[in-house]
């Protein structure tokens, strides 16, 4: 996201004391994520995006909205189709290819076996999320090569089968040159459990202030993933009821 400083954040999270997680926690999460990705690739779904920017009085100054249908081919190739024309009434904020790439690749965050080597990981204890006992895993890139978009933050994975139910962090790196700044907000992605037992992304939220040299810019973003439907099926995928 451009306008015209950035801080590449390192997550310093104190471990939550309790039971000891398995030594191969990251590997088990990656194996489960690979299985989840393989199943999710069999579904089409809708993706709705709303980004709002706010002025110094915290009044909405502009927005961007769109709706897409996402389809994965049998070979895993992603295809997108706009089902509702994009409306761009942003004032200061300029969306970049990196922003849309982060929505596709980073914010849903599938830490699969073939991507695990890109990251350093460290267990941070355990925590209960919506009644589900979870392990907490800190994740940060080993290194970032030119053109790469990676994740830095925390994952919450169920203790029962190592499914990721929540992720919080930021897409990195922030991109800063003498002529421009391309800064990215912290976000939270929430997943819900399907009747089949896999946890699919349901929504991503961001509420952050980006420290541009021209002045801070407050924004909110919401991405919803809905109407999951398996190829050839007549009914949408169903999610289990939320824990009270």
Image: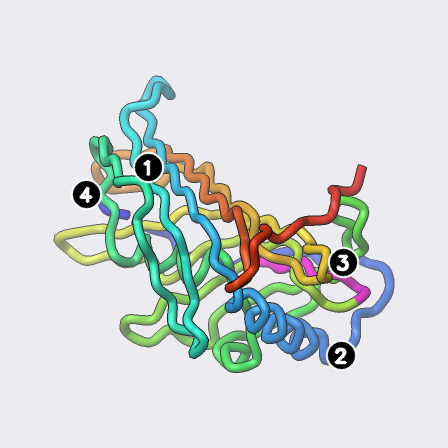
| Disc 3 packing (10 Å; few <14; some 14–19; many ≥20) | many
Residue wearing tag 4: 4
Distance between the Cα atoms at labels 4 and 2?
Answer: 45 Å
On the image, the x and y values in percent for residue 128 come to 78, 50
Q: Nearer the viewer, residue 117 or 193?
A: 193
Residue wearing tag 3: 134
User: Which of disc 3 and disc 1 is earlier in sequence?
Assistant: 1
| Residue at 62% in and 53% down | 237
Distance between the Cα atoms at labels 1 and 3?
Answer: 34 Å
Q: Nearer the viewer, residue 178 or 168?
A: 168
| Residue at 41% in and 57% down | 70
Residue wearing tag 1: 65
| Residue at 15% in and 55% down | 178
Q: Which residues are magenta?
A: 154-160
Query: Could you say which disc has been placed on residue 23 in the image?
Result: 2
Render colour scheme: rainbow
CB under 8 Å between callouts 3 and 4? Answer: no
Secondary element under disc 3, as helix, strand or loop, is strand
Q: Quadrant of residue 147?
A: bottom left
């Amino acid at each position: 996201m451009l306008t015209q400083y950035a801080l590449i954040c390192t997550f310093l999270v104190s471990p939550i004391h309790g039971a000891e997680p398995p030594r191969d926690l990251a590997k088990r999460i990656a194996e489960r994520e690979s299985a989840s990705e393989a199943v999710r690739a069999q579904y089409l779904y809708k993706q709705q995006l709303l980004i709002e920017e706010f002025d110094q009085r915290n009044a909405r100054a502009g927005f961007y909205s769109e709706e897409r249908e996402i389809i994965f081919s049998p070979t895993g190739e992603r295809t997108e189709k706009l089902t509702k024309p994009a409306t761009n009434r942003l004032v200061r904020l300029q969306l970049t290819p990196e922003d849309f790439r982060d929505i596709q690749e980073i914010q849903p965050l599938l830490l699969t076996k073939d991507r695990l080597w890109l990251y350093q990981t460290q267990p941070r204890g355990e925590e209960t999320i919506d009644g589900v006992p979870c392990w907490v895993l800190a994740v940060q890139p080993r290194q970032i090569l030119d053109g790469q978009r990676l994740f830095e933050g925390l994952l919450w994975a169920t203790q029962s089968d190592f499914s990721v139910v929540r992720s919080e962090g930021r897409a990195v790196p922030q991109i800063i040159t003498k002529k421009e700044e391309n800064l990215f907000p912290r976000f939270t992605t929430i997943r819900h459990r399907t009747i089949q037992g896999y946890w699919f992304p349901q929504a991503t939220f961001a509420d952050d202030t980006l420290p541009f040299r021209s002045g801070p810019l407050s924004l909110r973003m919401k991405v919803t993933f809905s109407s999951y439907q398996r190829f050839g099926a007549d009914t949408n995928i169903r999610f289990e009821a939320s824990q009270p």
